[in-house]
Image (tube, rainbow, N blue to C red):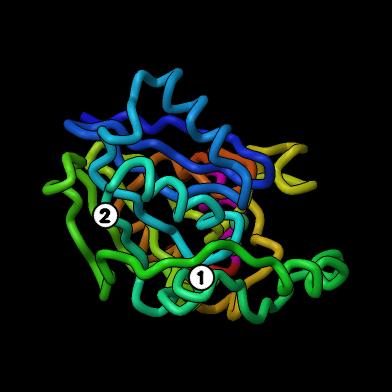
């Protein structure tokens, strides 16, 4: 069995998935290391216990402390091959807003930087995580970035990064309401990924901002756009 522990950080959520060994999903924004370590302590996990650090995608608020966490844990790091250049360079690259409010912040986020590195494991498509102590499947769910991935546990929960977000004001308000993230390079690809993800039957989705989101509220919200 697995347990998903949300780690709310400065701008985003990271997650610990506890199985036989713990796996860290995303590492927050730059300077979130102290927040991560506090959450580890609370969960009685030492950084050296980590079997893997996996990234839902290459943005600065999801890879911001990977360099430090890798140094502390010596754990292997993983990212999808399409987002590998982001993690290597520590840059977000171009962002395409999904609504007007996101235009206002676009140039700020495009300039964000973090300390990049070469990932140990480059994900090509799907991958089981059993060898890292987690009965779960990692699947390719692009749309927010070209190399976004999600993790679905055999227990029926999923960590999906920025495929969707919960609520308003970065997830502060009505955080269980499913919405498109502020940025997506193509909404039709988001639809394709969401449909693919739902075929794995997750009941609850943990997102990078706000959440968690119940599967049935997602289906209700998006059924007019997606043929689930
Ligand atoms: Zn993102
Ligand atoms: Zn994010």
Q: Could you say which is closer to the camera, residue 176 or residue 71? A: 71
- Cβ of mark 2 under 8 A from ligand 1: no
Ligand 1 found in image quarter: bottom right
| Bounds of the magenta segment | 217-224
Please state the horizontal and vertical placement of residue 186, each as a whole percent of the image: 58, 80
Q: Is residue 180 left or right of residue 73?
A: right
111 in the magenta segment: no
User: Alpha-carbon neighbours of circle 1 within 10 Å: few (<14), some, or many (≥20)?
Assistant: many
Q: Could you say which is closer to the camera, residue 203 or residue 51? A: 51
Q: Nearer the viewer, mark 1 or mark 2?
A: 2
Q: Which mark is residue 136?
A: none
Q: Main secondary structure of the magenta part?
A: helix
Q: Is residue 130 left or right of residue 81?
A: left
Badge 2 marks a residue whose secondary structure is loop
The residue that mark 2 highlights is 76
Q: Could you say which is closer to the camera, residue 130 or residue 79? A: 79
Q: Residue at x 66, y 81 (%)?
A: 94
Which label's residue is closer to the chain start, 1 or 2?
2
Q: Which mark is residue 191?
A: 1
């Amino acid at each position: 069995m697995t347990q998903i522990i949300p780690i709310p950080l400065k701008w985003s959520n990271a997650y610990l998935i506890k199985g036989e060994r713990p796996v860290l999903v995303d590492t927050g924004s730059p300077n979130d290391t102290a927040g991560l370590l506090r959450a580890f302590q609370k969960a009685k996990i030492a950084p050296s216990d980590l079997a893997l650090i996996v990234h839902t995608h290459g943005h600065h608020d999801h890879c911001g402390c990977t360099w430090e966490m890798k140094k502390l844990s010596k754990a292997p790091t993983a990212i999808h091959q399409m987002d590998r250049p982001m993690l290597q360079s520590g840059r977000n690259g171009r962002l395409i807003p999904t609504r007007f409010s996101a235009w206002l912040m676009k140039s700020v986020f495009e300039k964000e930087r973090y300390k990049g590195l070469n990932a140990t494991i480059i994900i090509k498509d799907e991958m089981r995580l059993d060898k890292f102590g987690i009965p779960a499947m990692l699947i390719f769910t692009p749309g927010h970035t070209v190399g976004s991935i999600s993790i679905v546990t055999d227990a029926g929960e999923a960590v999906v990064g920025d495929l969707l977000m919960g609520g308003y004001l970065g997830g502060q308000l009505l955080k269980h309401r499913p919405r498109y993230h502020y940025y997506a390079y193509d909404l039709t690809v988001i639809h394709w990924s969401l449909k693919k993800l739902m075929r794995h039957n997750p009941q609850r989705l943990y997102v990078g901002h706000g959440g968690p989101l119940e599967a049935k509220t997602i289906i209700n919200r998006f059924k007019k756009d997606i043929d689930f």
